[in-house]
Image (cartoon, rainbow, N blue to C red):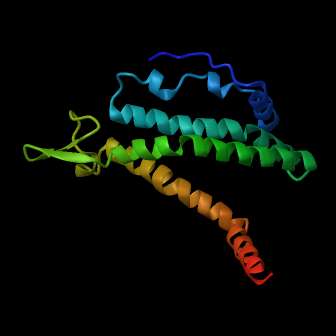
Amino acid sequence: NASFRIPWPPELERLWGAMSVSRVGVMELPGVSCISEGWGYFETLLAYTISFFLVAALLSIPSLWLLAQGAARSPRGKTVLDRFYFSLLVWIFLVYILLATESSRGLNCVEVEGELWLLAQLDVRCPYTDVRSGGFGLLLFAVLCFPVGIPLFIFLALWYEGVPQMAREKRESALFS
């Protein structure tokens, strides 16, 4: 694996600066796939899962700090909270396909000589053949969080904010005007 320094256009850097909650150079950090070379499927899945929640927790620090200070309802607190939600949604957008794909790979098993083996790592037995194993627990957690949980979270957030009702009203007003 090779990594290169990409010179971003100044306009894009200004846009990122305006949207940022904090000044952490996330693009400068090495990817999990670079660090995890030679790891097994479950070690990589665990690293992806921890990384996702770690970045989400780091993004929430300014909002939690204002909440602890009792300033979450102030204009500054609302701005910080809006930036947190925006940053969290961008983070989810960036990693959703990777996380959903990686966790779904754990469900793909093949039969070899009468036994089920994980296709992602053929020296590991299929995790759902032994529901008491740590691999099954991690896989179940990852599948519930990523391919199931993220779309459910987005749906509930849109529903809570009334987006379906707003869309219905806009559609009706466009049809009758």
Name the image quarter holding residue 29: top right
Name the image quarter holding residue 28: top right
Residue at the farthest bottom position: 176
Residue 123 at x, y percent in the picture: 21, 33
Residue 93 lies left or right of residue 166; in this view the side is: left
Name the residue: 82% across, 44% down.
80
Residue 107 at x, y percent in the picture: 31, 49
Residue 116 at x, y percent in the picture: 17, 46
Residue 120 at x, y percent in the picture: 29, 37
Name the image quarter holding residue 61: top right
Please state which of residues 93 and 152 is positioned toward the viewer in this rendering: 93
Name the residue: 67% across, 63% down.
158
Please state which of residues 151 and 15 is positioned toward the viewer in this rendering: 15
Please state which of residues 105 and 18 is positioned toward the viewer in this rendering: 18
Residue 107 lies left or right of residue 45; in this view the side is: left
In the rendered view, tell whether residue 97 sits above or below residue 171.
above
Name the residue: 7% across, 43% down.
113
Residue 62 lies left or right of residue 3; in this view the side is: right
Instruction: Name the quarter where the N terminus is drawn.
Output: top left
Residue at the farthest left position: 113
Name the residue: 48% across, 15% down.
2
Does the image show residue 21?
A: no
Task: Give the total of numbered labels.
Answer: 0
